[in-house]
Image (cartoon, rainbow, N blue to C red):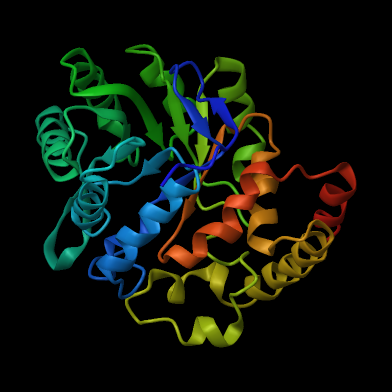
Amino acid sequence: MPRTQLKTTPLGTTGLDITRIGFGAWAIGGGDWEFGWGPQEDDESVAAIHRALEQGINWIDTAAAYGFGHSERIVGRALEGVAERPYVFTKGSLLEGPGRRVVHSLRRDSLMREAEASLQRLGLDAIDLYQIHWPDPAAEIEEGWAALAGLRDRGLVRHIGVSNFDVEQLRRIQQIAPVETLQPPYSLVDRAVEEELLPFAEREGIGVIAYSPMGSGLLTGAMTRERIAALADDDWRKHDERFTEPALSRHLATVGRLETVAERHGTTAGAVAIAWTLANPAVDGAIVGFRRPEQVDPLVAAAALELEPDDLARIAAG
């Protein structure tokens, strides 16, 4: 089936032209680990990836930590036999600890092993973008970044970036090798990066792919108090402060304003929330998590949605 054409934009100075939204593969790692999203059917995950590719999305972002390899295996399975492979971005530095909990390592040998295991699970000769998942332990970020530069030199990864780093940490590792990309959380429920981090990335020419543009589902328009109460016990969101009072009422009021704007454009609150993130000039792309194929089409609209100044003012009115 021929792919739909979506608008693309350069990802920093990588030379990669990416669609404004990418497929986020966190939730398809399943529920059986510390930051799982509850039960997930693998066949639905594969179908969601295929639908996203049909709709023109040209990159997937995953991580070794998502289900401790499970998400990467599902991405690899979905891409078997695909004629036009999307770019595949993944991340290392989070390892499986006791009780399926996360432990952190930025040691060179550990990252080398992780990257090679990711390549095997994904079925790739080289990873298009390899990222440090978290700057933890902070004392090891230089060692970790030097390891990623080494992986690029060896041809196992094509481009290197980081996720969840602050400006001071970016400055530290820039002494070793240029930072090509940054992956921060950014949405209407998490705007901390606006003040310092995004302007720094824009000045330095660092490509930005924002994660959780819909606030991990809070801004979709489908997340109600009843639905939160019914979330599986192994869904990390059930116990997150953003999904409980007093923050919840504030976020649901934001959803109301998003729905007003969505009605005007004939789209969904989730698509407007993503478009709001993409309206920041520092942001090249947004990572959108899909768990089922029917979730794809309503949110792909965000890739082409241009919010007007009136829309942005209405969304900010709270």
Q: Specify whether residue 214 is in view.
A: no
Residue name at image x 34 percent, y 41 percent: 134
Residue 87 at x, y percent in the picture = 36, 33
Nearer to us in this view, 5 or 290: 5
Where is residue 200? Give x, y as percent.
59, 23
Looking at the rendered structure, the number of numbered marks drawn on it comes to: 0
Residue 73: x and y in percent read 19, 52
Report whether 148 appears left or right of 114. Answer: right
Which image quadrant for residue 138? top left
Left or right: where does residue 30 sit relative to residue 247? left
- Point out residue 245 in the picture as x, y percentages from the top left corner: 62, 78
Would you say residue 294 is visible in this rendering?
Answer: yes
Q: Is residue 21 shown above or below 268?
A: above
Query: Which image quarter holds the C terminus?
Result: bottom right
Above/below status of 81 relative to 206? below
The residue closer to the viewer here, 135 or 119, is 119
Answer with left or right where residue 168 lies relative to residue 48.
Answer: right
Q: Residue furthest front?
A: 1
Using the image as rendered, state which of residue 133 and residue 152 is in the foreground: 152
Q: Residue at (58%, 75%) from the top-left corner?
A: 223
